[in-house]
Image: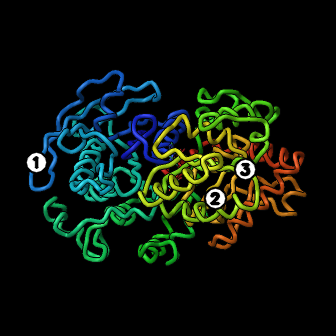
Amino acid sequence: MNVLFAASEAYPLVKTGGLGDVAYSLPKALHARGADIRLVLPGYHDLLRQLDAMRIAGWLEVRGSERTLGVRVLEARHAAYPFPLWIVDCPSLFDRPGNPYVAANGRDWPDNAERFAVFARTVALLAQDALGLGWRADVVHSHDWQTGLVPAFLADLATPPRTVFTIHNLAYGGYFPHADFVRLQLPAHWWSPEGVEFHGGLSMLKSGIVYADAITTVSPTYAEEICTPEFGYGLDGLLRSRRHKLTGILNGIDTEAWNPATDPHLSAHYSKARIQPGKRHNKRALLERFQPVDDALLDAPLLGTVGRLVEQKGIDWILAAMPVLLAESDVRFVVLGSGQALYEEKLQRLAQQHPDRIMVEIGYDENLAHRVEAGADVFLMPSRFEPCGLNQMYSLRYGTPPVVFRTGGLADTVVDADAPHCTDGTATGFVFDQPALAGFLDAIRRALDLYRQPKAWRRLQQTGMRQNFDWSESAGHYLSLYAT
Ligand code: ADP
Ligand code: GLC
């Protein structure tokens, strides 16, 4: 089966969040199960410089915004990938430094409509073997709004390949004014409330939902949630009407890259059979990155978090919880993240006020992310909504029980350490039910209580570390969906 996998980011070439992890680990898992994969990515500045071997696969003329662009398609190899990558090389759109979606000022690149319309048009052409490479897609699997137009372009063909569209986050709709729709000369028959139109503008996400043969999202609970007004961003009605083609498939994780027994980012290795002294060694190394460490400091619980600093992640609850917990216990915090300036500033201010107890690193740092997962005692992830979430799975695997809100993929992956689950040995973390600071604080206090009971804590860690979050089951679900 020939599967064309189209995404706007993929680890380790370009990554802003979990989509990058999934666009790396899922196609690899599909390849291992016999699918013939091509992964197609935009030729961003930083990405082009990381490719190992490449050749020009051909040139395509692709309509952009009131112009036609010459797009060079590269076929490249990269050590992390066992199959070829196709790179859409169009320098005026993609060869710029920095983030793939936003400029240095934090605002969306002003030409995002053109960038991702040209990318989608090129993907649709490659699926039909417009370059005569002798490879035609049976299935085209695209992801999030950046590739939402792909199923629409393909739906217009006489004999289209099967299209699967995955929603990683409904909060990002890929909205553009009607003027962009006109400038991009998108097919006029798409323009209706049954097509890509959304509140008078164009929604690339909606396009994926409307035109794909199958829609998936990244956890069973999120698949239910997005059909409700609370989580639906105005698309819940549409999603309810497409329920027959909507499936929730839980993300897997790359269990090689995220393995505390072999992780090259860690200063000591450990496993569920022998958590200590390895984990404590990582805690020391993590703390030492920020301050001198003595044994008393090592005994105090360390609460860690890694993530995009946006409202979705409940970072405001973390900010509000910090002073309360500092006053009532000996906890320390370590935070790695970047995002909204307001949250970055508040975190830095708190870290300045409590330099020995709040450690903050603003930025994106893959190495430090692994070290926080391993070195913290408890992982905080109080997301208001979470389509799947990978960090809580990493933290479970690293023996760092997570504190999470019961939503989306968090609800599907973490089992609360309430009395029944502690008794039957299935507990893996701390789950709160009310979306409010009080619930979050209560869950953290429960975590700190259990942390003081070494035997019970070790059992909780080991149960989490035993969970199997690899792709074996979910990759099978995708393959059956492709074959339907
Ligand atoms: P989301 O995709 O919503 O950001 P996920 O939990 O699915 O959330 O995935 C986030 C991914 O991005 C994880 O691999 C996490 O380690 C990584 N990540 C997020 N922020 C940072 C950061 N500041 N530095 C390093 N890695 C980060
Ligand atoms: C999105 C979601 C996150 C999910 C990731 C990968 O960014 O916010 O919950 O894990 O995509 O699917």
Instruction: Mark 2 and ligand 2: say if the CB distance to the nearest ligand atom is below 8 Å.
Output: no
Q: Residue at x 13, y 40 (%)?
A: 70
Residue 68 is tagged as 1
Identify the residue position indicated by label 3 in the image: 401
Is residue 130 or residue 331 the one in the foreground?
A: 331
Left or right, 257 with reference to 277: left
Residue 219 visible? The answer is: yes
> As rendered, which of 326 and 184 lies closer to the eye?
326
Given the image, on which type of amino acid does mark 1 rest?
Answer: Thr
> N-terminal of the two: label 1 or label 3?
1
- Identify the residue at image location x=57%, y=54%: 353
Kindly tell me whether residue 158 is visible in this rendering.
no
Give the CA separation, mark 1 to mark 3.
52 Å
Query: Which residue is most to the front?
Result: 353
Q: Tag 2's secondary structure? A: helix
State how far apart marks 2 and 1 are (Cα).
44 Å
- In the rendered image, the residue lying farthest to the left is 67
Residue 66 % position (x, y): 9, 56
Residues at marks 2 and 1 touching, judged by CB atoms closer than 8 Å: no
Query: Viewer-nearest of labels 2 and 1?
Result: 2
| SS category of the residue bearing label 1 | strand
